Image: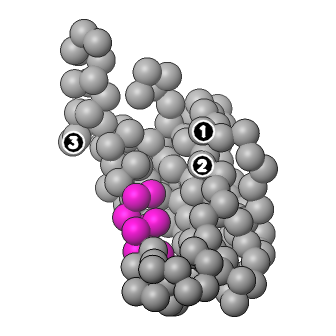
Amino acid sequence: MKQDVDLIIIPSYWKLDEPGSTMVRHDPRGENESKLIDGLVTSRALESEACVVFVNCGGKKEEGFLGRSCVSLPLKGLLINCLEPHEQLQIIDLDLSVLKVFIVSPLSFVCLHKSFPFTETNCPFCLKDASEVYKIRHEYHSKPF
């Protein structure tokens, strides 16, 4: 929030627990875990009024890899979602002249795919609209911490 960024990149190594663990006994296919990731990324985009790129590791499903790399915008939700855990490359075109980049973690990332150029119907104007609707940054900057 303090950096007032428009793009947040979150590299991750999020896998299912080891076979036989309590979590895997209750959610062996990782369905709830996948929903959690989608919800967290969408929530971070909303509460930060920024585009969030979540880049998770890829690998074999039987080894506990989930995939779920995705891009989310406030007011738009998930734009791209890698539903399968295998390694893949998705490319998203961003006009970095209108964005400030803040990398949350120094880890390298594996998985993005599809050409998705931002246009006036999606990114910068969406962020401006989200700012006007939610006013989260405005409230954050108006309070002394």
Give the Cα distance between marks 2 and 1. Answer: 5 Å
Give the Cα distance between marks 3 and 2. Answer: 25 Å
Please state which of residues 62 and 41 is positioned toward the viewer in this rendering.
62
Q: Which residue is mark 2?
A: 10
Q: Which x, y percent locates residue 59?
A: 76, 77
- Residue type at mark 1: give it: Val
Q: Which residue is mark 3?
A: 133
Are the residues flagged by discs 2 and 1 in contact, CB closer than 8 Å? yes
Q: Which residue is mark 1?
A: 104
- Dominant secondary structure of the magenta stretch? helix
Q: Which contiguous range is marked in magenta? A: 34-41
The numbered mark at residue 72 is none
Determine whether, in the image, residue 56 is placed left or right of residue 45.
right
Are the residues flagged by discs 3 and 2 in contact, CB closer than 8 Å? no
- Residue type at mark 3: give it: Val
Q: Quadrant location of the N terminus?
A: top left
Is residue 35 inside the magenta stretch? yes
Please tell me how crowded label 2 is: few (under 14), some (14-19), or many (20+) other residues with Cα within 10 Å: many
Please state which of residues 7 and 97 is positioned toward the viewer in this rendering.
7
Determine whether, in the image, residue 108 is placed left or right of residue 67.
right
Is the residue 86 above or below the residue 91 in the image?
below
Q: Earlier in the sequence, mark 3 or mark 2?
A: 2
Please tell me how crowded label 1 is: few (under 14), some (14-19), or many (20+) other residues with Cα within 10 Å: few
Q: Earlier in the sequence, mark 1 or mark 3?
A: 1
- Residue type at mark 2: give it: Ile
Q: Secondary structure at mark 1?
A: loop
Is the residue 46 above or below the residue 80 in the image?
above
Q: Quadrant of residue 105?
A: top right
Is the residue 121 above or below the residue 140 in the image?
below
Q: Which x, y percent locates residue 25?
A: 46, 88
Q: Earlier in the sequence, mark 2 or mark 1?
A: 2
Q: Quadrant location of the C terminus?
A: top left
